Image (cartoon, grey):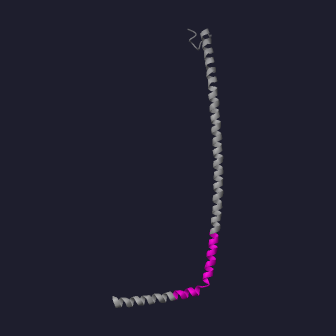
Amino acid sequence: MLAANRFCLVPSMGRIRTDAAEGLTSEVVRKAAQPRHSQVAQYQRQYKDTVAKAKEQAKQAADATAKTLSRGALFGALALMLGALAAFFAGKASAVNAPRSRDLADRMAARRQQAKAFLDRSWKLFG
């Protein structure tokens, strides 16, 4: 039969009916798929918007964190410099009293010798 043969050069009535039915079916499928395509497109737009908003929020959070950390590092360096300056002046102030500290060291050495002598005598008496 010629109607069953799709590659026939002369279209028959069966072929015209088949083509019309296929065209109608594809049109119905396209119309049924259109809402789905628009819904998918809407989901894609919503996804892209959400990703853009998330990126923007992440950038803002990173900027705020960097600002806070740099401020903390600056104050930490300032505190370190002030501590070094205070240690320098404290060292300079205590260096003036160096002879007194030598006298104290001499007195402590004398006391150690006295304590050692006392312990040696105690060991001789009770040991």
Residue 86 drawn in magenta:
yes
Q: Of residues 93 and 11, which is closer to you in this image? A: 93
Residue 8's x, y, as percent?
59, 12
Q: Residue at x 64, y 71 (%)?
A: 82
Choose top left, top right, bottom left or bottom right for residue 119: bottom left
If the image is split into quadrants, where does the C terminus sit?
bottom left
Q: Can residue 12 be seen in this view?
A: no
Residue 17's x, y, as percent?
61, 12
Answer with left or right where residue 121 lies relative to residue 18.
left
Q: Residue at x 63, y 74 (%)?
A: 86
Residue 25 drawn in magenta:
no
Q: From this view, report whether residue 115 is shown above or below residue 9.
A: below
Q: Is the magenta stretch mostly helix, strand or loop?
A: helix
Of all residues shown, which one is farthest toward the front? 126
Of all residues shown, which one is farthest toward the left? 127
Answer with left or right where residue 114 lies relative to residue 62.
left
Q: From this view, report whether residue 45 is shown above or below residue 96.
A: above
Choose top left, top right, bottom left or bottom right for residue 100: bottom right
Residue 77's x, y, as percent?
63, 66
Q: Residue at x 62, y 12 (%)?
A: 16
Q: Residue at x 56, y 85 (%)?
A: 101
- Range of the magenta residues? 80-106
Q: Is residue 13 visible?
A: yes
Residue 20's x, y, as percent?
63, 14
Q: From this view, report whether residue 42 is shown above or below residue 84.
A: above
